[in-house]
Image (cartoon, rainbow, N blue to C red):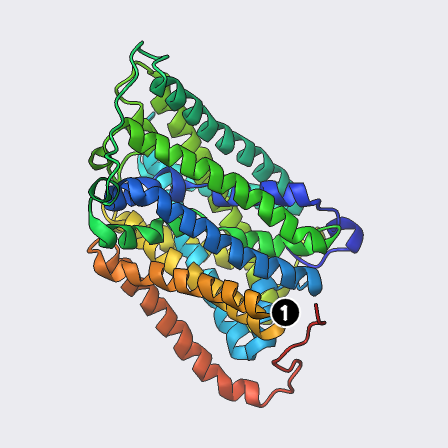
Amino acid sequence: MGQKKKSETKNLTWWKLALVGIGSIIGTGYFLGSSIAIKQAGPSAAFAFVIAAITTYIVFDSLAKLTADHPEKGSFRSYAKKAFGRWAGFSNGWVYWSSELLIMGSQLTALGIFSKFWFPNTPIWLFVTIYGVLGIIVILTGIHGFERFENVAAVVKVAAILMFIIIAGAAIFGLLDGERPQSSVEVSLQGLLPNGVMGLWTAMIFAFYSFGGIEIMGIMANDLKDPKQAPKSGRVMLSTLATIYVISIVLAVYLVSWDKFTADESPFIVALASYDLNFVPHVFNGALIIAGFSTMVASLYAITTIMVTLSNDGDAPKFFSKTSKRNIPFRALGLTVVGLLVSIVVSLLLPDKIYEYFTTAAGLMLLYTWLFILFSYRKLMPLGAGGKMKQSIGVVFIVVAVSGTLFNGDSRPGFFVSVAFLLLIGIVTYMMRNKWKKQPKKTTPGSLFKKQ
């Protein structure tokens, strides 16, 4: 996270980065958020995940190619700064910091709720404290400890999804109770889109949220032995996630009617509830805890790293750029912890709806970052007609996902929360302009990258 010697940092292989990506991405956004998507879109939720996967690939491919051509410690915020000026780098960094802070708060609260499944008499705040301390301990082990933890978490989470796919497949072929179940999906326009196009539209944000975390791969791509392998790492990671995501959702809605899913329970538990499998709720509750904890740790790592780069660039107080002899940025981590405590308190005050509000707000703010990645790539790298078309498709899909939140009563508050954060950061950015005008320019917006 701090400045490291080359020998200490440039040792990450593409497949390890892919595992870090899987570990950082698969979280409660998928294990629980997919239920919300199914509830709103019905069987067509699988289509929403396909669109989200395509868009995520376009965004990460752009970020990976920028990294391969010109590695930067600040990743996406550094590219935004080079493309559009200091205001873009400043606002991107703080929007990302805020969004990941919201994610950590909601993740920790969710972890407390999941843990009460086994320990119903223990207060949530105690679980939140325990997981928060454990997360900080993982970060204090350094980048290598963080990488190893996320690699193990990735294997566990993928194994849990594969276990569901295998069990669901066995159920479909009549291997669990001796009878093959009838499909709950009616193959017709009404059957696939029970809530119409509007249902699919409003479900998009939850599909996108299930892929949130590619920014962490972008930050860590600077540590690759060969940065040019970043696109390969993304392709492997996203093809793996898209495949298991879509297959598992299709199997879930095949076994159980879409209207049986709720926002409070994982779709995998609902889909297998009618079978005599007492271990399933315990296995998936454990998977939910591991998933939520690993994505929380990834967010903790990402925003602490971003705070250091903001500080180094003069976009945050220099106080936060200082690191220990072991290159641990204790000051930046301390600010993250303070912000996290505030986020947790807010989430505990509004326990009933906070998951949807926070995930929507955080998801929208991450999509703001994704848009800037696409715009920065288009500004800095010369593109042909095909490349411009691909970028335009990514922008359109992101705008569709964002706009869909305005037409759902549960998502709409989250949209306004995100707008409030954007307005606040925008006002601060505007106020900083006078200070920046007095400082010498270090970079000039425009195409600073070599021709491809």
Q: Amino acid at mark 1?
A: Asn
Q: In which quadrant will I find the C terminus?
A: bottom right
**Along the horizontal axis of the image, is 52 left or right of 228?**
left
Q: What residue do we see at 36% from left, 36% from top?
A: 249
| Helix, strand or loop for disc 1 | helix
Q: Residues within 10 Å of mark 1 (few under 14, many from 20)?
A: some
Q: In which quadrant will I find the N terminus?
A: bottom right
Q: In the image, residue 228 lies at what x, y percent?
A: 71, 55
**In the image, is residue 211 above or below residue 368?**
above
Q: What residue do we see at 48% from left, 62% from top?
A: 370
Q: Residue furthest right?
A: 7
Q: Quadrant of residue 384?
A: bottom right
Q: Residue furthest top?
A: 178
Mark yes or no: residue 324 visible. no
Judging depth in this view, the residue of 382 and 337 nearest the camera is 382
Judging depth in this view, the residue of 418 and 203 nearest the camera is 203
**Along the horizontal axis of the image, is 408 left or right of 178?**
left
Q: Quadrant of residue 168?
A: top left
Q: What residue do we see at 30% from left, 63% from top?
A: 403
What is the number of callouts on the image? 1
Q: In the image, residue 74 lies at what x, y percent?
A: 61, 64
Q: Quadrant of residue 439?
A: bottom right
Judging depth in this view, the residue of 121 and 201 nearest the camera is 201
Q: Determine which residue is flagged by label 1.
A: 312
**In the image, is residue 333 above or below residue 154?**
below
Q: What residue do we see at 34% from left, 39% from top?
A: 32
Mark yes or no: residue 26 visible. yes
